[in-house]
Image: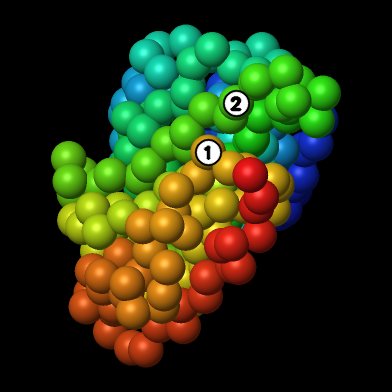
């Protein structure tokens, strides 16, 4: 039961409940986890019973796929043009599920998986699906210990962090466009300046007990 205090897992696709529930039973001492290749859908998970709460403090999830409805995906990469966009509802469900599963969370990174479309496919007319948007208007989440939050390849707007309570927050890093060539994102056109982006994070700043360092990745790095 004391097999590991930190863990990592790469090149595997699994459903979110495995990270949120199963690992807690397998490794009750787990405090730090980095996972690559995760499928999240719109199905809420129950909060753990009394003494079963996770001790996880650091959670870094990469290549996360936000799937509509109750489905799960089977692949670790979205190769080629996709017929269906990832789900904004699944993003909101993911946030509430993390609140329920990881009450001790201090550092939380999430990077969404993007489509991979070749130059040849794009020249033939293939287009990227629009990215999902984090919309928290239906949520009421509290992360009492969260100090650092990073979100990559998920669109954000003025509704993204309403109804969040993160009093210990110290650092936020947002990268709505991500590291890839991603012309489907309209974030740069909608929020061209630091001033125009401030209302997005203002709910987090208002709820924090101290100063919050806000970082934005360069958002005009894609090309048509």
Left or right of 89? Residue 146 is right
Left or right: 221 in relation to 43: right
Q: Which mark is residue 98?
A: none
Q: Earlier in the sequence, mark 2 or mark 1?
A: 2
Q: Which residue is mark 2?
A: 127
Structural distance between the alpha carbons of marks 2 and 1 = 8 Å
Q: Which residue is painted at 52% across and 70% down in the image?
A: 216
- What is the tally of numbered marks visible in this picture? 2
Answer few, some or many: residues within 10 Å of disc 1's Cα (few below 14, many 20 plus, some between 14 and 19). some
Q: Pointers 2 and 1 in contact (CB under 8 A)?
A: yes
Disc 2 secondary structure class: loop
x 35%, y 70%: residue: 197
- Camera sees residue 76: no
Q: Which colour assignment does the render follow?
A: rainbow
| As drawn, 70 above or below 180 | above
Residue 213 vertical position relative to residue 12 in the rendered view, above or below: below
SS type, badge 1: loop
Position in image of residue 164 (x %, y %) = 25, 59
6 displayed left or right of 87: right
Q: Position of residue 36 (x, y in %)?
A: 71, 38
Residue tagged 1: 184
**Where in the figure is residue 179, as x and y percent of width and height?**
69, 53
Q: Residue at x 56, y 47 (%)?
A: 153
């Amino acid at each position: 039961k004391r097999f590991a205090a930190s863990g990592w897992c790469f090149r595997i696709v699994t459903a979110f409940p495995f990270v949120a529930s199963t690992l807690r039973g397998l490794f009750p001492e787990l405090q730090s986890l980095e996972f690559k290749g995760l499928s999240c859908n719109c199905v809420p998970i129950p909060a753990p019973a009394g003494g079963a709460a996770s001790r996880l403090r650091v959670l870094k999830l990469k290549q996360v796929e936000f799937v509509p409805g109750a489905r799960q995906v089977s692949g670790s990469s979205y190769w080629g043009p996709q017929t269906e966009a990832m789900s904004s509802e699944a993003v909101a469900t993911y946030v509430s599920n993390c609140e329920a599963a990881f009450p001790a969370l201090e550092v939380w990174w999430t990077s969404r998986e993007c489509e991979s479309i070749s130059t040849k496919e794009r020249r033939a007319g293939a287009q990227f699906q629009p990215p999902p948007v984090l919309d928290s208007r239906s949520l009421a989440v509290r992360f009492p210990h969260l100090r650092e939050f990073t979100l990559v390849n998920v669109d954000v707007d003025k509704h993204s962090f309403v109804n969040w309570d993160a009093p210990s927050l110290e650092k936020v890093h947002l990268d709505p466009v991500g590291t890839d060539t991603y012309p489907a994102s309209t974030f740069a056109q909608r929020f061209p300046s630091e001033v125009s982006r401030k209302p997005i994070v203002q709910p987090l700043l208002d709820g924090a007990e101290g100063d919050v360092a806000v970082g934005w990745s360069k958002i005009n790095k894609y090309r048509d």
